[in-house]
């Protein structure tokens, strides 16, 4: 455990803490994770190496990198993809290309705001290492997808701790293991609804015709919101915790612990007014969806976000991407001899797609997984001290107590 972490109650996912909570009608995948989608690989790396920055304050380095591979051979075979921007005070590089073509053929990296440039370079460095010619040169094009949220409260942004090598390592080590949650990957230094937040994931199995099933999975980097807005399955848990804290301070105005807690919350509120976090949502599915349908899935992330208490504040970067692994599409920009085409001679291509009139279950499942993934990001996150601030983890015992009358 990093010294930035402060011991807190044992962390568990929302379904472990609240076994009867209602989070939608569809069954979760075996791992309840984005990696339940066949072929999708994920890596998370946390960065705490303060020793590399002798002029940094103690515990000041708390950032990381999350790497998602839509498929192992992403360089040769593209996925269909769609993007939705709920509120645009954030960044996702490569988004114009996806909106223009509906194609995704790059890793997706999520990190802190000041790590975007290094992450971008890291994808290029990996691709050059693996796909340059005998002279080390390239003749292909690639527009990396890198998204960010702001971790400046718990991390010293000026140290630029994320390096291209972190991303190269992330691509090399991405696996189908369950996604690690809470203070991990790009979510290492993130804050959600004034509690420690970070990385979360979830999945659903959707029945289809002829006894088929499709999987919808998600990974979120949650870094937004006020405590008073935080909800669990509709219950106003954040407001109840906030009101209890206010009441205790009024009853014990000289209690040093309560005063310190109040001071921290006030400071966080002030900082969040300057830059209210953001949330990045990456949805994946093996259902055969075309780009417009995937954009519609991405839009449903807004529903899941709103259930937990997000509403898209002015300076929040709420950017959602959905991709499908069902159709494997040759990447024509990888201009090897066997992939060259005549751009002036139209060719037909055969793809699979879900009939639009039968898409409701996939839309509903997309909302459900986002709701649960955000909750998992908060439930699994540990209290963290860093960069002169301390953000408490959600008190899971208090949650069980307060949820008693709602379940």
Image (cartoon, helix red, strand yellow):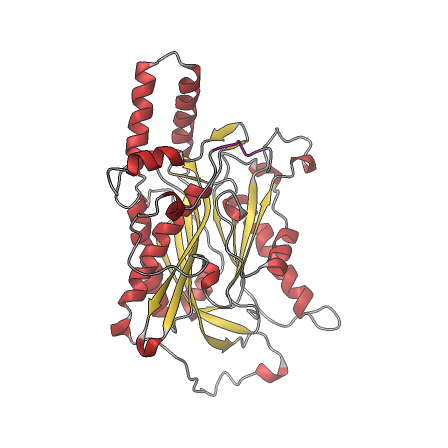
Work out whether residue 228 can be spotted.
no
Q: Where is residue 100 in the image (x, y as percent from the top left)?
A: 42, 68
Residue 142, compared with residue 278, is above or below; it is below
User: Can residue 397 be seen by looking at this rendering?
Assistant: yes
- Residue 111 within the magenta-colored segment of the rendering: no
Q: Where is residue 233 in the image (x, y as percent from the top left)?
A: 28, 46
* 317, 64: nearer the viewer: 64
Whether residue 7 appears in magenta in the rendering, the answer is: yes
In the image, 307: left or right of 124?
left
Q: Position of residue 147 (x, y in %)?
A: 48, 53
Span of residues in magenta: 4-8
Residue 27's quadrant in the figure?
Answer: bottom left
Residue depicted at 42% across the width and 42% down the height: 379
Image quarter of the C terminus:
top left
| Front residue (pair 49, 119) | 49
Residue at position x 43%, y 15% from top?
256
**Position of 231 compared to 158: left or right?**
left
Main secondary structure along the magenta-highlighted residues: loop
């Amino acid at each position: 455990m990093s010294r930035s972490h402060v011991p807190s109650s044992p962390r568990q996912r929302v379904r472990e803490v609240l076994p009867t909570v209602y989070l939608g009608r569809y069954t979760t995948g075996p791992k309840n994770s984005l990696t339940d989608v066949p072929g999708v690989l994920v890596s998370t790396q946390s960065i705490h190496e303060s020793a590399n920055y002798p002029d940094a304050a103690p515990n000041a380095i708390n950032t990381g990198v999350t790497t998602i591979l839509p498929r192992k051979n992403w360089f040769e075979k593209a996925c269909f993809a769609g993007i939705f921007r709920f509120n645009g005070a954030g960044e996702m590089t490569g988004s114009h290309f996806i909106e223009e073509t509906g194609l995704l053929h790059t890793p997706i990296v999520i990190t802190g705001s000041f790590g975007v440039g290094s992450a971008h370079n890291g994808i290029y460095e990996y691709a050059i290492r693996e796909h340059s010619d005998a002279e080390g040169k390239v003749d292909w094009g690639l527009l990396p997808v890198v998204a960010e949220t702001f971790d400046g409260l718990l991390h010293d942004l000026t140290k630029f701790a994320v390096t291209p090598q972190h991303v190269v390592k992330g691509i090399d080590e991405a696996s189908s293991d369950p996604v690690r949650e809470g203070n991990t990957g790009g979510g290492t230094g993130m804050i959600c609804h004034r509690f420690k937040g970070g990385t979360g994931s979830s999945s659903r199995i959707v029945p289809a015709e002829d006894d088929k099933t499709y999987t919808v999975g998600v990974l979120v980097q949650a870094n937004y919101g006020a405590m008073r807005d935080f909800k669990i399955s509709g219950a106003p848990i954040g407001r109840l915790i906030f009101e209890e804290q206010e009441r205790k301070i009024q009853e014990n105005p000289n209690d040093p612990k309560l005063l310190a807690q109040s001071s921290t919350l006030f400071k966080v509120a002030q900082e969040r007014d300057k830059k209210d976090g953001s949330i990045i949502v990456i949805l994946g599915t093996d259902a055969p969806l075309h780009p417009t349908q995937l954009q519609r899935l991405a839009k449903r992330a807004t529903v899941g976000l709103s259930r937990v208490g997000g509403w898209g504040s002015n300076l929040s970067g709420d950017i959602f991407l959905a991709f499908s692994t069902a159709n494997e599409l040759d990447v024509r920009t990888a201009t090897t001899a066997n992939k060259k085409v005549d751009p002036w001679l139209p060719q037909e291509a055969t793809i699979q797609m879900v009939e639009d009139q039968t898409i409701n279950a996939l839309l509903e499942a997309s909302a459900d997984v986002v709701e649960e993934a955000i909750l998992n990001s908060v439930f699994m996150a540990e209290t963290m001290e860093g960069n002169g601030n301390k953000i408490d983890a959600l008190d899971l015992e208090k949650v069980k107590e307060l949820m008693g009358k709602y379940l």
